[in-house]
């Protein structure tokens, strides 16, 4: 029909062009040709575009996201309970779930500090491997080393020194770990070994009152005795030195209610 002639002409021209293209491709050395692609973008490019325009939201739970404060507090509490019980397996599981080894309760106890005072060496190694803070302090401003020295935990003391704890830190009482091990120690071989480890680790062997960071020792030359001092001598022109303790009743004394003990003057 006449109205189909233009369509036939167009089809003939397209067929001729296709045959020419095939002939050229076959005559080329590689014997291949590239057909223009009208396919949709690949899956990878689509995913990249979507990831750029629509980022994946950050999870609200889990170890890498922002945890609910109540859930975090519960994990930390359970970790402290596991530390008190020396339950290494439970502590490892709780740490893997996001529990904080340095989180403290209202008494300033953390899982890390509990291991130092109780002498749980395996659990201490676990807390140190997961960020245990050797500078953490308890309610007495004491480090874990001071707590371990007081209890005579030689292994814990050595481990903390290797971890870099401050050996000569002074707590609120004015004592270091060495003072705690000597003054509060029981004189057993365990405490002797603890003292040796502290001294080998660089502990200062000065008494507490000679440390600059501790209040100075009182001047006993001008301070009264805790139970009372000598009363002033009687107003006599001549007297011999006083005798102490009194061999007999003094000839002059002040009232005992003043809290001052008399000297024995002849």
Image: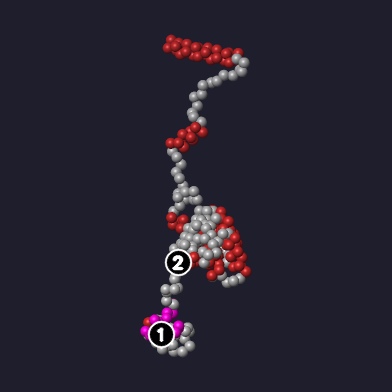
- Sooner in the amino-acid sequence: mark 2 or mark 1: 2
In what quadrant of the picture does the N terminus appear?
top left
Residue 82 makes an appearance in the image: no
Provide the major secondary structure of the magenta segment.
Answer: loop
Give the residue at mark 2: 216
The answer to whether one can see residue 73 in this image is yes
Tell which of 219 and 35 is nearer to you. 219
Q: Is residue 153 shown above or below 250?
A: above
Residue 90 on image: x %, y %: 56, 59
Disc 1: which residue: 238
For residue 184, above or below residue 95: below
| Residue 237 is a magenta residue | yes
The answer to whether mark 2 and mark 1 are in CB contact below 8 A is no
In the image, is residue 192 above or below residue 122?
A: below
State the SS at label 2: loop
Q: CA distance from mark 2 to mark 1?
A: 38 Å
Quarter assignment of residue 260: bottom left
From the viewer's side, name the closer residue of 119 and 181.
181
- What secondary structure is marked by label 1? loop
Q: Residue at x 46, y 64 (%)?
A: 214
x and y percent of residue 202 in the render? 56, 59
> In which quadrant is the C terminus drawn?
bottom left
Q: How many marks?
A: 2
At 58% across and 13% down in the image, what residue appears?
A: 23
Magenta segment range? 226-242
Report the front residue among 196 and 4. 196
Labelled disc at residue 92: none
Mark 2 or 1: the one toward you = 1
Tell me the residue at 45%/36% (across/down).
52
161 is within the stretch colored magenta: no
User: Which x, y percent locates residue 40?
Assistant: 49, 28
Q: Residues within 10 Å of mark 2 (few under 14, many from 20)?
A: few
């Amino acid at each position: 029909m006449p109205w189909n002639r233009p369509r036939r002409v167009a089809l003939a021209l397209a067929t001729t062009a296709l045959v020419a293209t095939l002939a050229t491709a076959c005559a080329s050395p590689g014997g291949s040709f590239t057909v223009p692609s009208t396919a949709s973008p690949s899956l990878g490019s689509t995913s990249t575009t979507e990831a750029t325009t629509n980022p994946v939201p950050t999870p609200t739970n889990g170890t890498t996201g922002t945890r609910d404060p109540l859930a975090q507090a519960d994990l930390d509490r359970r970790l402290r309970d596991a530390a008190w019980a020396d339950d290494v397996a439970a502590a490892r599981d709780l740490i893997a779930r996001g529990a904080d080894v340095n989180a403290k309760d209202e008494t300033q106890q953390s899982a890390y500090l509990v291991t130092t005072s109780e002498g749980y060496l395996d659990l201490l190694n676990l807390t140190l491997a997961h960020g245990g803070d050797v500078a953490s302090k308890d309610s007495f401003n004491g480090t874990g080393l001071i707590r371990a020295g007081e209890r005579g935990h030689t292994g814990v003391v050595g481990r903390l020194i290797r971890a870099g704890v401050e050996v000569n830190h002074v707590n609120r009482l004015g004592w270091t770990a060495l003072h705690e091990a000597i003054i509060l120690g029981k004189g057993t071989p365990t405490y002797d070994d603890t003292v040796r480890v502290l001294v080998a680790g660089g502990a200062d062997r000065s008494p507490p009152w000679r440390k600059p960071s501790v209040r100075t020792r009182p001047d006993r030359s001008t301070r009264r005795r805790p139970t009372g001092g000598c009363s002033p001598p009687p107003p006599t022109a001549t007297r011999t030195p006083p005798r102490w303790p009194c061999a007999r009743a003094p000839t002059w004394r002040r009232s005992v209610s003043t809290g001052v003990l008399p000297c024995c003057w002849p």
